[in-house]
Structures are given as C-alpha cells and as structure tokens.
Image: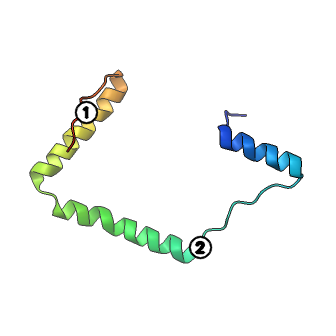
C-alpha cells in the first residue's frame, strides 16, 4: 500500500465510520467533450501567435528548468 495524503486518509476514515464507500461525482460527458475540444484548440492557437524569438525564449526557459530539476539547482526568478 502506497503513501496516502491527508485527504485520502480522511476519506478512508469517513468510509470506515459510515460503513459505506463514498462515490466520486460523475462527470458530465458534454462538459468533458467541450473542455477537451477547447484544450485541443488552445495550444495550437497560442503557438500560431508566438514569434520565433518568443518561442525560442520559452523553450530555453523550459530546458533550463528541466536541467535545474535534474541538478538540484535554484533558478533565477525571471519573469517572462
């Protein structure tokens, strides 16, 4: 059994004390489809608006963040 966070432990206690498992809420399929459709459009629309210089800047910032995570180095707090 893996580690559980505070909310998972609280849920387990409630389920044990009530004797019935709590069901997660059902998602509205129409809302899920709408959100997915918007999400698929958003990234492409944003990429189309970016200049090549800005795209390069974002890519360099992301690469630095990934390497800092690997090396355990703090990054400069630069805003874009």
**Disc 2: CA contacts within 10 A as few (<14), some (14-19) or many (>=20):** few
Residue at disc 1, secondary structure: loop
Q: Indicate the quadrant containing the C terminus: top left, top right, bottom left or bottom right.
A: top left
Q: Is residue 3 above or below residue 33?
A: above
Q: Position of residue 60 (x, y in %)?
A: 19, 39
Q: Which mark is residue 3?
A: none
Q: Position of residue 17 (x, y in %)?
A: 87, 47
Q: In this view, does 35 lie above or below 50?
A: below
Q: In the picture provided, is 9 more to the left or to the right than 60?
A: right
Q: Which of marks 1 and 2 is nearer the N terminus?
A: 2
Number of disc labels: 2
Q: Where is residue 57 in the image (x, y as percent from the top left)?
A: 16, 44
Q: Indicate the quadrant containing the N terminus: top left, top right, bottom left or bottom right.
A: top right
Q: Mark 2 points at which residue?
A: 28
Q: Observer-nearest residue: 32 or 25?
A: 25
Q: Residue 77 carries which label?
A: 1
Q: Which residue is drawn at 68% across and 34% down?
A: 2
**Disc 1: CA contacts within 10 A as few (<14), some (14-19) or many (>=20):** few
| Contact check, label 1 and label 2, Cβ < 8 Å | no
Q: How far is the residue under mark 1 from the one under mark 2? A: 40 Å
């Amino acid at each position: 059994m893996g580690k559980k966070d505070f909310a998972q432990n609280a849920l387990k206690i409630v389920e044990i004390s009530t004797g019935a498992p709590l069901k997660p809420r059902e998602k509205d399929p129409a809302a899920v489809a709408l959100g997915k459709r918007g999400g698929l459009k958003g990234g492409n629309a944003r990429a189309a608006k970016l200049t090549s210089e800005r795209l390069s800047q974002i890519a360099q910032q992301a690469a630095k963040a990934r390497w800092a995570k690997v090396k355990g180095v703090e990054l400069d707090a630069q805003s874009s």
